[in-house]
Image (tube, rainbow, N blue to C red):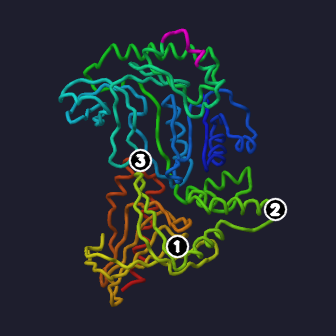
């Protein structure tokens, strides 16, 4: 089956080109996207939505029903783009499961997955439960959330039982359209014992399709509710697939290539767009110049953003593939240099507390200094640590995706493995186990894993030659 995909956000053009080439149908395109693509119209609700996240512009959310549709799109993105990071739900949204209470408002379901109960009293240990997953665990340390009601999802509707009332997706705004959809379900008496939610794709469905689907889903919800729990940990009805694919700067360069096939695209287009303003507007300006014979480049925009921060503070956004982010700094940017197609930054920070330097196991004191050397063409950042007299305490080489520059920020995906060097000692590669674990869990792609290992070996040789 040819699954249809709706694509939204800053990667929409590039991902639409990629997915179309892989055999997917592009459904419900935005006006801008429709003007760029010469594709046959798809007059049905999309099975899968891919959209950039508002709070993490380095990533896209993939959500799809049926499950197989979302999983196929997710796998296509991970397999087709280089150096991605990714994480996916185990159970899926609106998946109905049977579970066994563990007490303390937790329960165990299929494959030993532990879920958190959303509301009501916490049943005693050993009690059998049936409910619906209403929140997946996509962040580090999170657990899926189970509600005791039954919610069944279809192409156009989500029907909950017990429940009552009607609600609409925020994308169904027109009063006439809402009235049409309401009319399609009225007369059946379902809204008094079920909650009926119209998904965004409902506006593309006929009255007959809506009427048929609401009866089918309501009947299924009632049956699953009346059956009660089986006492065996199991998936009873699979819901929506949900996953997140993160794009390193190297992934974004591949996306730049896809986008450039149909519209003028400057280098580092997606890297700059993902840092927000003012870089996003500068990209639009640069591409308008490109269409009219100009020569503003993405590297030039990065250099402009960095150069105007010299002598001022910047933050390092240290992003983990598991979805967590540490904000390091502030650092004072002491210099920004352009070397052809890459930018080299030097930033400093005065340490303010007693403690131990991570990885180096060397004591630090207030007044010691960190000097960070950041090169957008490298897969690492070098942090040098000095005491107040200027004596080198140690060097920490962080292995990461090539850094990206925004307005007052430098961001990258940390790749777990690192290299440390203490004065008078040979470099040491650390945290290899964390990288191995990330590969086993599917959080980093195979090519990213191998690149990180290769970079650690290269950096180890570099530090051995550069520092005493």
From the viewer's perspective, is the residue at label 3 or at label 2 nearer? Answer: 2
Mark 1–mark 3 Cα distance, whole angstroms, equals 28 Å
Quadrant of residue 224 within the rendered picture: top left
Of residues 408 and 424, the one nearer the viewer is: 408
The reply to whether discs 1 and 3 touch (Cβ–Cβ < 8 Å) is no
Q: Residues within 10 Å of mark 3 (few under 14, many from 20)?
A: some
Q: Is residue 240 above or below residue 180?
A: below
Q: What residue is shown at x 52% (from left), y 40% (from top)?
A: 62
Q: Which mark is residue 283?
A: none
Residue that mark 1 sits on: 375
Which of marks 2 and 3 precedes in the sequence? 2
Mark 3–mark 2 Cα distance, whole angstroms, equals 44 Å
Q: Farthest residue toward the front?
A: 175
Location of the C terminus by quadrant is: bottom left
Measured as percent of width and height from the top left, residue 151 is found at: 42, 24
**Is residue 288 toward the left or the right of residue 424 in the image?**
right
Q: Residues within 10 Å of mark 2 (few under 14, many from 20)?
A: few
Task: Give SS at disc 3.
Answer: loop
Q: Farthest residue toward the left?
A: 125
Which of marks 3 and 1 precedes in the sequence? 1
Task: Give SS at disc 2.
Answer: loop
Measured as percent of width and height from the top left, residue 117 is found at: 29, 33
Residue that mark 2 sits on: 292
Location of the N terminus by quadrant is: top right
Which of marks 1 and 2 precedes in the sequence? 2
Quadrant of residue 321 within the rendered picture: bottom left
Q: Is residue 413 above or below residue 220?
A: below
Q: Which residues are magenta?
A: 182-189
Residue that mark 3 sits on: 442
Mark 2–mark 1 Cα distance, whole angstroms, equals 31 Å
């Amino acid at each position: 089956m040819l699954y249809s995909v709706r694509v939204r956000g800053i990667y929409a053009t590039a991902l639409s080109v990629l997915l179309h080439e892989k055999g997917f149908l592009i459904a419900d395109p935005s006006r801008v996207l429709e003007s760029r693509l010469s594709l046959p119209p798809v007059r049905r609700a999309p099975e899968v939505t891919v959209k950039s996240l508002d709070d993490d512009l380095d990533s896209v959310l993939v959500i799809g029903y049926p499950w197989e549709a979302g999983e196929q799109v997710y796998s296509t993105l991970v397999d087709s783009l280089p150096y991605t990071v990714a994480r996916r739900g185990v159970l899926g949204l609106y998946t109905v499961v049977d579970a066994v209470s563990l007490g303390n408002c937790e329960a165990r379901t299929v494959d030993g997955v532990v879920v958190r109960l959303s509301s009501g009293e916490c049943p005693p240990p050993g009690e059998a439960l049936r409910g619906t997953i209403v929140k997946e665990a996509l962040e580090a340390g999170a657990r899926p959330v189970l509600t005791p009601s039954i919610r069944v999802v279809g192409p156009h509707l989500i029907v909950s039982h017990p429940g009552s009332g009607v609600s609409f997706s925020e994308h169904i705004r027109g009063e006439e359209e809402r009235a049409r959809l309401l009319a399609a379900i009225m007369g059946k008496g379902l809204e008094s014992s079920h909650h009926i939610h119209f998904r965004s794709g409902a506006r593309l469905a006929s009255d007959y399709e809506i009427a048929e689907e609401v009866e089918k889903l309501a009947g299924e919800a009632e049956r699953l509710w009346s059956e009660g729990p089986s006492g065996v940990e199991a998936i009873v009805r699979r819901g929506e697939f949900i996953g997140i694919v993160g794009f390193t700067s190297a992934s974004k360069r591949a996306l730049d290539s896809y986008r450039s096939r149909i519209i003028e695209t400057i280098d580092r287009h997606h890297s700059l767009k993902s840092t927000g303003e003012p870089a996003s507007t500068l990209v639009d300006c640069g591409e308008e110049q490109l269409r009219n014979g100009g020569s503003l480049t993405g590297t030039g925009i990065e250099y402009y953003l960095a150069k105007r921060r010299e002598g001022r503070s910047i933050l390092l956004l240290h992003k983990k593939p598991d979805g967590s982010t540490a904000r390091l700094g502030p650092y004072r940017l002491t210099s920004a240099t352009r070397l052809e197609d890459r930018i080299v930054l030097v930033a400093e920070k005065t340490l303010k507390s007693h403690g131990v330097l991570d990885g180096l196991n060397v004591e630090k004191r207030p007044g010691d200094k960190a000097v960070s050397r950041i090169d957008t063409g490298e897969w690492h950042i070098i942090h040098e640590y000095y005491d107040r007299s200027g004596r080198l305490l140690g060097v920490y080489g962080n292995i990461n995706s090539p850094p990206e520059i925004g307005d007052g920020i430098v961001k990258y995906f940390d790749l777990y493995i690192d290299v440390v060097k203490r004065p008078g000692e040979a470099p040491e590669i650390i945290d290899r186990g964390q990288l191995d674990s990330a590969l086993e869990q599917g959080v980093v792609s195979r090519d990213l894993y191998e690149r990180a290992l290769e970079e650690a070996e290269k950096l180890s040789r570099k530090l051995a030659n550069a520092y005493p």
